[in-house]
Amino acid sequence: MDFKKAAIISSYISKDYAEKIFKLLMAYQDISASEAASRLDMHIRTVQEFLDTMSVYDIIDKKEVFEKKRPYFRYSIKKKKIEIIIDLDKEFEKNNDHKSGYKIREMKNSGAKFSVARNGEYFSTLTIWIGDGRDGKERKINLTIPQGRFLYYLPFPDTHPLSVDEIMQKADNNDIHKSEILDIINELLDLKIIEKIEG
Amino acid sequence: MEQKLKQNMKITGLIPAIISIIIFAFTAILWNITVGFYVLGSVMLFYSLLMFIAFYRTFHWGSLLYTIYMISYGFLLLSVAPVIVLDKHMDVNDFSLISKILFFTTIILFNWLLYLNIKRKLKWRGREILELAAQNIEEATGNFTERPLPTGKVKFSKQELESFSKFFEKRLLGLTYKENTRIVFMPLKYKNEYFALYNPNYNYHEKTWVAINYNGNVSVNISKEDYLDYKEDLAFEQLCNSLSDEIIEFIELFLDGRQVRIIDRMDNLKVSVFR
């Protein structure tokens, strides 16, 4: 399940009437939106929206029935256990290997200020000024030690760029820190502090 | 050899002298010439204290000589102050014996210091170090960045680095800072020494330095101020690597007992005594 889907389901389940509707669905073989609304003394549109959403996510079964009246929908419970599972590994592609085949270096006139840690062997913070003049804001990013070590070995502007793996090797960084390094690279690419050279 | 650094037109080196003259003139006009001499003598004794601090920091014998000169000059002014009268012809016999001794001592020390200055024995060598680093570096624009560059690994022991750091200061190549895991060598340019020596909040991290940690990792930082001091924009990474190589070569020469070669290399640049 992705974050978007999980967020929608969670928001509906957290409604104060969610428990009452599910209680009805467990008690009834199937039920229409108007029956449920009248039973719970709620507005039919609120109940219908809830039931439709749950059916989209396969928690409730929705069937169109034809009686004397015009066709309408009856709802029944489909899953008696509702689990919201987000696979973070899959979600954020932990290794990101296929995305690190490019070379990088610091961008010309990036304006970023790299502050060296106490022992002088890595950067501890990165300060960036966003905007100009009075509207300019200072943004400070506290770096993890692997990130700080990585950036310490980042090639200078206009020099021969290096791949992420080459810089990691120079910085003596362990592969388990690659995802956090890729995270700061993506952020710095967005902030135009570093530039990507394809190839 | 073409010099790559701009002319240094700073008057920082003259600031103490200018201050002394202003104070002397101010007190002499406001009170009288005797008070002026007393105050100027006291100022000289204060400067001698500053010179002693420089000696204590570097163990450079020239600073000790300056200290003695300032003491001698200060006491000379204090000793002649009571007998100095404006618009009156003064004779040597008007002064006490102690004043006469101090006068000759001051003159000898002054000339000695002047000679040592001309021979570059009292000159901070940061400018020469930066000149040497810039030799054979290509021009390139817009690749300066205000961050250090790791330049490689060396195999010097902690004792060797500490020993070289003493030489570095004693020969006025610059100042060194011992941190927990490394030694920072900061070349110090002539006329910049006042800030580095007497400002307790001096932030050497933002200056030009070469740092070597006890595992042998070498890092270089070149300050924006020093980079802009070059006449042309130079390839920054090459410049950092060159400065690092230069300091490493100096350490190797020092450990080989060829310290004189280090000084020769700087003297051969023939950088003006007053730059």
Image (tube, rainbow, N blue to C red):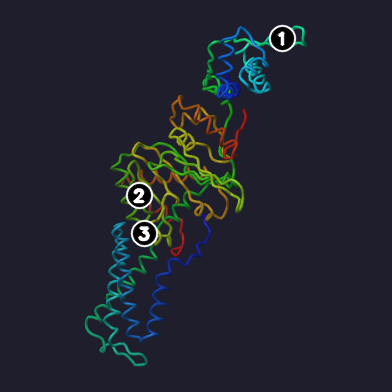
Mark sitting earlier along the chain (2/3): 2
Label tally: 3
Report the residue marked by disc 2: B177
Locate residue B124, reporting x and y percent: 39, 58
Q: Which amino acid, by three-letter code, is at mark 1?
A: Glu
Looking at the image, residue A166 sits to the left or right of residue B258; the answer is: right
Give the residue at x 29% y 90%. B91
Q: CA distance from mark 1 to mark 3?
A: 88 Å
The subunit letter for the residue under badge 1 reads A
Q: Which amino acid, by three-letter code, is at mark 3?
A: Leu
Discs 2 and 3 carry the same chain letter? yes
Which of label 1 and label 2 is nearer to you?
1
Give the residue at x 57% y 32%. A186
Q: Residues within 10 Å of mark 2 (few under 14, many from 20)?
A: some
Vertical side of B20 occupied by B202: above or below = above
Dot 1: element: strand
Vertical side of B214 occupied by B261: above or below = below
Report the residue marked by disc 3: B197
Q: CA distance from mark 2 to mark 3?
A: 12 Å
In depth, the one of A185 and B140 nearer the eye is A185
Indicate which disc residue A64 carries.
1
Dot 2: element: strand
Q: Residues within 10 Å of mark 3 (few under 14, many from 20)?
A: some
Dot 3: element: helix
Q: Which amino acid, by three-letter code, is at mark 2?
A: Tyr
Give the residue at x 63% y 21%. A41
